[in-house]
Amino acid sequence: MTVDPRNLRESATFPREVLAEIHRAADQGVYDIRGFGAKRRLPSFDDLVFLGASVSRYPLEGYRERCDTNVVLGDRFAEQPIELKIPITIAGMSFGALGANAKEAIGLACTAMGTSSTTGDGGMTEEERRSSKTLVYQVLPSRYGMNPDDLRRADAIEVVIGQGAKPGGGGMLLGQKITERVAGMRDLPVGIDQRSACRHPDWTGPDDLTIKIEELREITDWQKPIYVKIGATRTKFDVPLAVKAGADVIVLDGMQGGTAATQDVFIEHVGIPTLPAVRQAVQALQELDMHRKVQLIVSGGIRTGADVAKALALGADAVSIGSAAMVALGCNKPVHVEDYYAIGTEPGFCHHCHTGRCPVGVTTQDPALEARLKPEQAGRWLRNYLAVMTLELQTMARACGKSHVLNLEPEDMVALTVEAAAMAGVPLAGTDWIPGRI
Ligand code: SF4
């Protein structure tokens, strides 16, 4: 029998993936948990373009004229601020979510490029401390692996309030990834699913946060910068409150930020995209006269030097990458393809970090799988990727006539869509119009 094509119209409300998810939910009675970040199309840095120099602006010559990339983070109160050679840092990713080899590879790449890496839920591993010249230590609601001695061994402290993939929620680590070593560091039983707390047990609001930050400063003798990381939601209120509480640096993670494991509904439906969040954060800092005094690190969907350049042009001091760093380490690479099939996916589509069966050894605690990631080799891949991003960033900045990447500014860009123009606060291309402004 022939099928009438009119009977094959896919519903916009119930497309195939929605039908499949309803069938899965009906079958299993549990919500979907997965890794990676939001997969839906969101307004992003792709919707902005630079206005390269022409008659009215003078570009810099790539091979003869310098374009510096160094940045200082945390010089508001800390005796020893962080000095980085490039404004691209690696975001916090836990040992447990990632294997120890991946953490070591990240440290090696960061040290080679003169930038920082960050711990995560579950504490600091010896491998990452050894390999990372500059290591930021996260203080999380779960307190897993929290150790005052490690606070002092870190180069900066990051109080994590929220994450772009799940602001208001806690992460998960499924039992298959909780080996004896992970369990030992987190004080948990081996092999049992774990859900991280969504809020800090020892403070409930900005006043308590002030006390917490002071406590951390005392423990570290006022030497280390204190960062505060927030997931992008009510950014224009959260940033001033974090500044008032004493943060040296704000880390702002937009909705495109990744996670190792959380509910799919959270990843796709909570938080705001990075683009409007940066603009709101910069505006809040400017209103407090704290822009460039309290530094802003932006994360969530940064993939290229162009993304970095756009974030800096909007007013960020640096960016942080997580998912993109994992991809540089081999995530979603078309190797060991049969192992992607075994967990129900293919290279290019994988978001199965929660399973612990990562085919390329990035997000696994299985010794055989983890051995596929060689720290030296993967560290070289990530270092190369960071170097390429930095060159791209400098190319963009030189084209706009800037001798330092932090001299990029909003007026160097225009937006390709009305929504991006409104969110980023830059004019729609070919006009002077910024929607929402007179
Ligand atoms: S390849 Fe590994 S790290 Fe990448 S999404 Fe799949 S499980 Fe996660």
Image: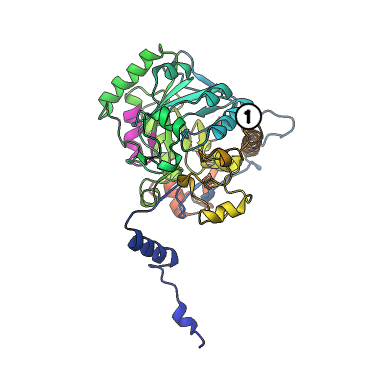
Q: Residue furthest top?
A: 221
User: Going by the picture, which residue comes out furthest to the bottom?
Assistant: 1
Residue 121, visible in the rendered structure: no
- Residue 62 percent coordinates (x, y): 71, 34
Q: Is mark 1 within 8 Å of ligand 1?
A: no
Q: Nearer the viewer, residue 191 or 249?
A: 191
Percent coordinates x, y for residue 297 in the rendering: 47, 32
Quick one: SS at disc 1? loop
User: Where 335 sits versus 294, above or below?
Assistant: below
Q: Position of residue 305 (x, y in %)?
A: 60, 40
Report the residue at 36% width, 13% height from top: 218
Please give the name of the residue rendered at 45% of the width and 40% of the height, measured from the top-left corner: 177
Q: Height in image: 6 above or below 283?
A: below
At 52% from the left and 87% from the top, the residue drawn is 2
Write down the residue under mark 1: 403
Number of marks in picture:
1
- In the displayed structure, does residue 267 sit left or right of residue 341? left
In depth, the one of 430 and 327 nearer the eye is: 327
Q: Nearer the viewer, residue 214 or 55?
A: 214
As drawn, 429 above or below 405: below
Which residue appears farthest toward the right when viewing the image?
A: 63
Whether residue 432 is visible, yes or no, is yes
**In this picture, residue 424 sits left or right of residue 244:** right
Q: Amino acid at mark 1?
A: Ser
Q: How far from the left and from the top, in percent, is residue 103? A: 54, 32
Q: Is residue 287 magenta?
A: no
> What residue is at 41 percent from the left and 13 percent from the top?
222
Main SS of residues in magenta: helix
Circle 1 packing at 10 Å, graded few (<14), some (14-19), many (20+), is some
Question: Start and end of the magenta stretch?
Answer: 230-242
Left or right for 210, reference 279: left
